[in-house]
Amino acid sequence: MKKLIYIFLLFALPLAAAAQASETKPICPVFTAVEFEAGGARLIDTYLAPWSYSGWDVALQVELMQAMKLDNYNWVWQQRIGLNFGLTQLSISGAGRTLLGGADYNFAMMHRSSLPIKGLQLYYGGNVSLLGECIYNYHSGNNPVNVKADISLGLTGMAVYNFAWGRVPFTIRYQLTLPVIGAFAQPEYAESYYEVGLGNYHNFIHCGTWSNRFDIDNRITIDMHMGNWALRLGYHNRINTTNVNNNRYQLVMHNCSVGFAGDLSSLDFKNSNRPVVRALYQLPQ
Amino acid sequence: MKPQPITYLLAIVILAQLQACYVNDDLHLKNDAHTNFDALWSIVDEHYCFFDYKDVDWDSVYNHYAPRINDNMSSYDFFNLCGEMLATLQDGHVNLASGFASTHYWKWFQDYPVNYDERIIHDNYLQFDFYQAGGITYKKLRDNIGYIYYDSFSSNINPGTLDYILAHFITCDGLIIDVRNNGGGSLGNVEVIISRFITEKTLAGYIQHKTGPAHDAFSEPYPYYYQPAENHILYGKPVVVLTNRHTFSAANNFVQVMKSLPQVTIIGDRTGGGSGLPFTYNLPNGWNIRLSASPILDAEGNDTEWGIDPDIKVDMAPDAQQTGRDAILDCAIEHLTHSSL
């Protein structure tokens, strides 16, 4: 008897799901944003030199976001891919040079909650981030470079507010990403990468917690909607901090950004009548 | 009243901003002589690896030199005073590099016989008829002995080139590798050459590093090994390595490993040492300080910072030099000729 019930469920559930899908069929475009960032960076890495460096930084960020069927479309996934490059000099004297370059990837799943204030929505959830950063100090020697590799699990959340100014709709968003636990690489106090290359990985990979690693990412954007697309202006603040093996590292970036955001599939001109949701944020509350 | 989630969020953000303080640690510093002197002294204090080995009291060095610093002194005076202070470390790997000059400690070889004259070798042994490739000068000498001169481990060696060179000497009774006046370079090139003279995995030595700013904070010695070069020519006949006091740093490391091989004899003078892997750091004014940071020990766990004694000690006699003879090279040829009998 049990077997018959299982067989029934096996066939009946997909049919039921299909029936439900055919009833609602909400449109969930992949919300895409491309941003170019430029701003200032301040850096200290005592493995390379015990002084801070400051200079400029540029970055390219790509963001993808889409509503999920989970919990009646109250969850979204978000992916962010970033590339950055900077040039800094000794803060004290303006001499010396340190280059930094890196790439990062974030995947987040967030739950959506509507707040009593009209137009305001709150998203919150978990985040996985991968970060690779290379810092090169022009002093050469056997310690000219320090490589940062970091994987972490953390929290992320964003507050989104939709409003209209005249006839133009706007969306303001603030997103905070806060890695909590993970792993990262850092050689010992004065261990050369030559020695690491010989196979000495002792104390090279560290469990990252807020006791030895603290990263935070703050983003504020404002989207001015024009049809299916939006002009995006923003501010991005990123702080990466590690303190392990008697080596302190911190990178602080303050970047302004400009870009565009919208639904990439709307570029499908063969299907110009396709109804699209202007932005993920404007799913019904 | 129960705190709202937004309250927690704000608290986290505020905490995060409090973390952002490392990069502001040095905002109060001025780019003056006192600041740069203290920075130089502290960097050396926290990173130099031979204080105990050389019995240097770095605190008393500070007390001796710090009163002589004033913010009105010229860049050259400041530079010279720093160089004088760094000379107390007696280390050829310690240099202060400014935009106009670098300090050097020369005494590790200047108080010793030169023991090398390139012109004598070119005139009377190579007759200005030799091959050169990849920083290596080589020729078959009289008595069927091969000769290689390698002047710097900074010159990269192509494995294919090394195959040609060793094939050229395959019928010789022995090989001389002359690393006199070789001031070092890349440890990678040391391995490339030594991998042709071993037939099994060989313990090359140990490497250590500082684990913190204390003078005695060191990691456990980590053994490192060299493997014979696969699919390349190996040389198994007797080898002599020629050394003088100017055989330094990576060249010192080369001699250290070669000396442990059974078919190798070291002839000449004690090497100049320099067994600490150097690190470099910026001073606040942009000058660079290079210093020994990571000791490399031999296969018995001994430090070779003060140099390595040869198996056969020979100096170039001044009278032999005047007749165009290199006593060290002659000794090596004779040694190999006899060992091949």
Image: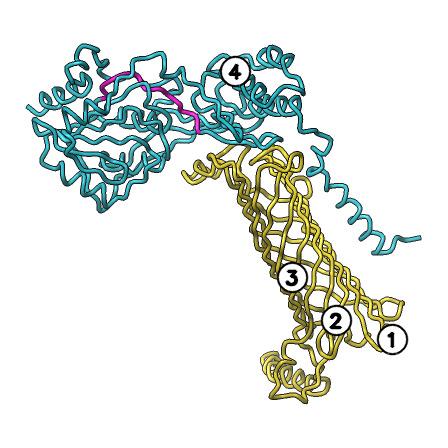
Chain colours: A yellow, B cyan
Which chain letter goes with mark 2? A
Q: Residues within 10 Å of mark 1 (few under 14, many from 20)?
A: few
Camera-side residue: A89 or A112?
A89
Q: Give the image location of residue B142, x and y in percent.
A: 8, 27
The span from disc 2 to disc 4 (Cα, nearest Å) is: 71 Å
Same chain for marks 4 and 1? no
User: Which quadrant holds the C terminus of chain B?
Assistant: top left
The span from disc 3 to disc 4 (Cα, nearest Å) is: 51 Å
Which residue matches tag 4?
B84
Left or right for A133, reference B309: right
State the image quarter where residue B157 is shown.
top left
Mark 3 belongs to which amino acid?
Answer: Phe
Camera-side residue: B136 or A25?
B136
Left or right for A169, reference B327: right
Q: Which is more N-terminal, label 1 or label 2?
A: 2
Which residue matches tag 1?
A166
Which chain letter goes with mark 3? A
